[in-house]
């Protein structure tokens, strides 16, 4: 059997607070938000949202760099919605805004990069099996380069 592609170890600290050990990458503390937990760290839904946004940002950078472009200082923000589905809270949608550190005119073959970068994102494409994810991309001037279809 081959080694797993990724791993993390969770240890309960108190109540709903966990330490997550990423091995050589360090440890973080997570906690459920009130009223269940105390909100002493990001909760699982925030970690999921961060993973989606991080993967999309990295995929966009990869797609631009593939064509020898420099995306500049890329930033991302992500918001999510929780709704009751069959009586239980579920993450039902996320909205990710990606911002490039360059104006569009400075990036060759940007249209091709924008057309394909989401397909490179393992996390988002996996999550989209059950959660709606909208993605907007802007350049450094604020011009919308890609918006939800």
Image (cartoon, rainbow, N blue to C red):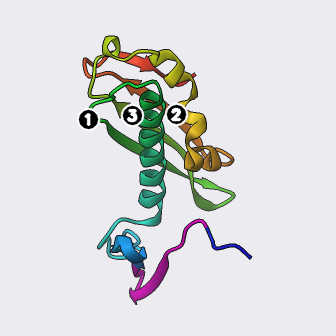
Q: Which residue is tagged 1?
A: 73
Farthest residue toward the front? Answer: 68
Specify whether 73 is left or right of 27: left
The residue at the point 43 percent across, 42 percent down is: 58
**Mark 1 or mark 2: whose residue is earlier in sequence:** 1
Farthest residue toward the top? Answer: 105
Tell me which segment is drawn in magenta.
5-19
Quarter of image, res 41:
bottom left
Q: Can residue 80 be seen from the camera position used here?
A: no
Specify whether 60 is left or right of 85: left
Q: Which residue is tagged 3?
A: 97
Q: Which residue is tagged 2?
A: 134
Task: Pinpoint residue 141: horizontal percent, then vertical percent.
Answer: 25, 17
Task: Pinpoint residue 125: horizontal percent, then vertical percent.
Answer: 62, 44
Would you say the residues marked 2 and 3 are in contact, meaning their CB atoms lie under 8 Å apart?
no
Specify whether 66 is left or right of 69: right
The residue at the point 53 percent across, 19 percent down is: 112
User: For numbered disc 1, what is the local secondary structure?
Assistant: loop
For label 2, count other residues whose C-alpha is less than 10 Å away and answer few (under 14), some (14-19) or many (20+).
some
Separation of residues labelled 2 and 3 (CA atoms) = 8 Å
**Mark 2 or mark 3: whose residue is earlier in sequence:** 3
**Mark 3 or mark 1: whose residue is earlier in sequence:** 1
For label 3, count other residues whose C-alpha is less than 10 Å away and answer few (under 14), some (14-19) or many (20+).
many
Q: Which mark is residue 42?
A: none
Quarter of image, res 140:
top left
Task: Pinpoint residue 18: horizontal percent, then vertical percent.
Answer: 40, 80
Considering the image in quadrants, where does the N terminus appear?
bottom right
């Amino acid at each position: 059997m081959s080694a797993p592609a990724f791993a993390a170890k969770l240890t309960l600290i108190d109540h709903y607070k966990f330490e997550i050990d990423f091995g050589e990458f360090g440890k973080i503390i997570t906690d459920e938000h009130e009223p269940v937990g105390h909100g002493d760290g990001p909760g699982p839904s925030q970690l999921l949202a961060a993973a989606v946004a991080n993967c999309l940002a990295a995929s966009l950078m990869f797609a631009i760099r593939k064509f020898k472009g420099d995306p500049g200082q890329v930033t991302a923000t992500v918001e999510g919605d929780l709704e009751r589905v069959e009586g239980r809270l579920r993450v039902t949608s996320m909205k990710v805004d990606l911002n490039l550190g360059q104006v569009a005119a400075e990036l060759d073959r940007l249209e091709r990069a924008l057309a394909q970068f989401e397909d490179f994102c393992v996390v988002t494409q996996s999550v989209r099996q059950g959660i709606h994810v909208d993605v907007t991309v802007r350049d450094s001037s604020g011009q919308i380069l890609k918006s939800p279809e």
